[in-house]
Image (tube, grey):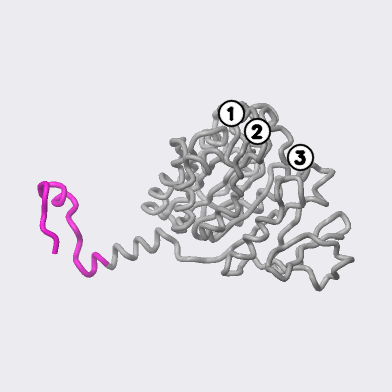
Amino acid sequence: MTDLAEPAPATTRKDWSSDQEVRWCPGCGDYSILAAVQMLMPELGVRRERTVFLSGIGCAARFPYYMNTYGMHSIHGRAPAIATGLATTRPDLDVWVVTGDGDALSIGGNHLIHALRRNVNLTILLFNNQIYGLTKGQYSPTSEVAKVTKSTPFGSLEQPFNPLSLALGAEAGFVARTHDMDRKHMMETFRRAHAHKGASFVEIYQNCNVFNDGAFGQITGKDHRADMLIPLVHGEPIRFGAEGQFGVVMDPDGSVEVAEVAAVGEDALLVHDEHKENPGLAFQLSRLSRGPFEPTPIGVFRDVERGEYGEQMADQIALATERRGPGDFAALLRSGSSWTVG
């Protein structure tokens, strides 16, 4: 039995990498995300035998095979539900959920929002490539309006989900965004998500170079990042651009927009507050861009502490046991088809 009081042994990326052949399409953004996670794990000071990666169905769902930890490739959309059961009954484990925009936001949407609402101690990584990659290129819940795919030959009619807005609407305590072209940013974002106690949600812009190549190229390409990615840094004015010439300001109606610093003045810039209890401002920032072709905020949108579900459940059980005494579940099962309550 591992002594929890003992510090975790030093490890390397190799220790966290399984012996399975990584099988994604050559050039897929999933490779860089996997590398970022495998490189980060030794820095977290955690144990492989107390780490679990759970996934649903989709290209991203292969992830647990490539981590030398415990893991489970579960069923479509249900990874948050399975992870909830594990995290609440085994608080000694580090539980990660790896999912995609189709897996998490279509059939799995209900499970995702309730895991966030309950504030289960999970680190959820959502790979968003705006397409169904595993099933060969159908439109997904995050595909843009008018997206032409095999399943929408005349263009999608549906308004896409904004994953961050969804998470913030579910009152997730930690909400962030990163992208697969910046390993350093991914690692720091994942580090902070893991450190947060409760439900952490990270959207990762991830390129599917076969069925939706370049979906985020207008903002994540090296030639575009400075003027198109808006770094969110707690306590600092929200400013961006190669020369810092742009910033984010708040309008009188409470909405936010991009402005030229020279036109509005530095004092008008919005100062980022990721610890703000009310998620309204973070929600406005999540809606700043209409799609990955306009300046887009990146980083931590919200980081607030709330009561963690597993701890609260354990406290409630302990209180009930104190008041009523330990129950006998086996006796209940054998008690027949009816029983008297009270």
The answer to which of marks 3 and 2 sits earlier in the sequence is 2
Which marked residue is nearer to the observer: mark 3 or mark 2?
A: 2
Q: Secondary structure at mark 2?
A: loop
> What percent of the width, then of the height, locates residue 35?
64, 39
Q: Secondary structure at mark 3?
A: helix
> What percent of the width, then of the height, locates residue 6?
47, 56
Which residue is disc 1 drawn over? 151
Between 254 and 98, the one lying in front of the other is: 254
Q: Is residue 213 left or right of residue 278?
A: right
> What percent of the width, then of the height, locates residue 128?
62, 42
Between 29 and 287, the one lying in front of the other is: 287
Which marked residue is nearer to the observer: mark 1 or mark 3?
A: 1
Residue type at tag 3: Gly
Whether residue 1 is visible: no
Q: Are marks 1 and 3 in contact (CB under 8 Å)?
A: no
Q: Is residue 296 left or right of residue 19?
A: right
The answer to which of marks 1 and 3 sits earlier in the sequence is 1
Residue type at tag 1: Ser
Which residue is disc 2 drawn over? 155
Q: Which mark is residue 217?
A: 3
Whether residue 191 is visible: yes
Quadrant holding the C terminus: bottom left
Residue at point 65% right, 56% down? 286
Q: Which residues are magenta?
A: 320-342
Relative height, residue 331 to residue 34 (above, below): below
